[in-house]
Image (cartoon, helix red, strand yellow):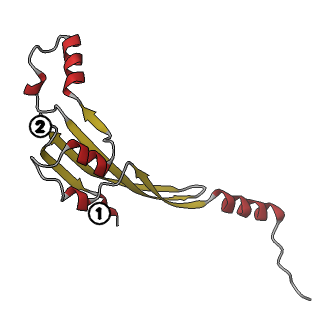
């Protein structure tokens, strides 16, 4: 006589439910315009203009204008000094974020890992809208 194995129906249902509730996710996250190091190398303090910067990198994520900031300070009665005395006047800021995401979702165990790194370019302009100095940090290379 042959013996046959039969799975009980509730056990098959439970195994199917466990398989349906488990998953794996792998993805990437991007935010902002990419800051190309080749273009950053072309920035020359005292020579490169604000218009050139905007044509190369697009509109900045952050821009502090001395006239707007001066109005805010005047309204709040914080200072009576001219804004040109402050080092943060006329700053263009560009940031590109990139992230790698991995996740495993099981019934009793979940694991999620997200690594996000940034490239950041900050440009300080003088009174003639020319680059006074700049700083660039490239952090996204760590994710490649």
When the figure is inspected, residue 35 is found, relative to residue 85, above or below; the finding is below
| Number of the label disc, if any, that sits on residue 32 | none
Q: Label 2: state its secondary structure.
A: loop
Seen in the image, is 112 located left or right of residue 13? left
Q: Residue at x 58, y 58 (%)?
A: 106
Mark 2 vs 1: CB contact within 8 A: no
Extreme right residue here? 1
Q: Residue at x 68, y 59 (%)?
A: 20
Seen in the image, is 35 located left or right of residue 134? right
Q: Residue at x 41, y 54 (%)?
A: 114
Q: Quadrant of the N terminus?
A: bottom right
Q: Nearer the viewer, residue 90 or 96?
A: 90
Q: Quadrant of the C terminus?
A: bottom left
Q: Nearer the viewer, residue 77 or 36?
A: 36
Within 10 Å of disc 2 (Cα), the crowding (few <14, some 14-19, many 20+) is some
When the figure is inspected, residue 80 is found, relative to residue 35, above or below; the finding is above
Residue corresponding to mark 1: 141
- Residue 132 place in picture, x, y as percent: 10, 43
Give the tally of numbered discs: 2
Q: Nearer the viewer, residue 18 or 101?
A: 101
- Residue 74 place in picture, x, y as percent: 19, 13
| Number of the label disc, if any, that sits on residue 126 | 2
- Residue 25 place in picture, x, y as percent: 54, 60
When the figure is inspected, residue 24 is found, relative to residue 44, above or below; the finding is below
Extreme bottom residue here? 1
Query: Which of the two discs, 2 and 1, labels the residue nearer the N terminus?
Result: 2
Q: Quadrant of residue 22?
A: bottom right
- The span from disc 2 to disc 1 (Cα, nearest Å) is 31 Å
Q: Nearer the viewer, residue 61 or 16?
A: 61
Mark 2 vs mark 1: in front: 2
When the figure is inspected, residue 139 is found, relative to residue 55, above or below; the finding is below
Q: Quadrant of residue 115?
A: bottom left
């Amino acid at each position: 006589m042959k013996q046959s194995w039969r799975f009980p129906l509730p056990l098959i249902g439970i195994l199917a439910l466990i398989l349906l509730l488990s998953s794996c996710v792998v993805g990437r996250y991007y935010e902002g315009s990419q800051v190309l190091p080749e273009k950053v190398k072309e920035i020359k303090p005292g020579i490169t203009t604000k218009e050139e910067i905007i044509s190369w990198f697009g509109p900045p994520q952050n821009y502090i204008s001395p006239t707007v900031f001066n109005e805010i300070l005047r309204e709040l009665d914080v200072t009576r000094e001219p804004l040109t005395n402050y080092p943060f006047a006329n700053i263009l800021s560009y940031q590109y974020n990139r992230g790698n995401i991995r996740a495993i979702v099981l019934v009793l165990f979940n694991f999620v890992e997200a690594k996000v790194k940034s490239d950041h370019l900050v440009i300080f302009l003088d009174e003639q809208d020319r680059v006074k100095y700049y700083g660039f940090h490239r952090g996204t290379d760590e994710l490649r």
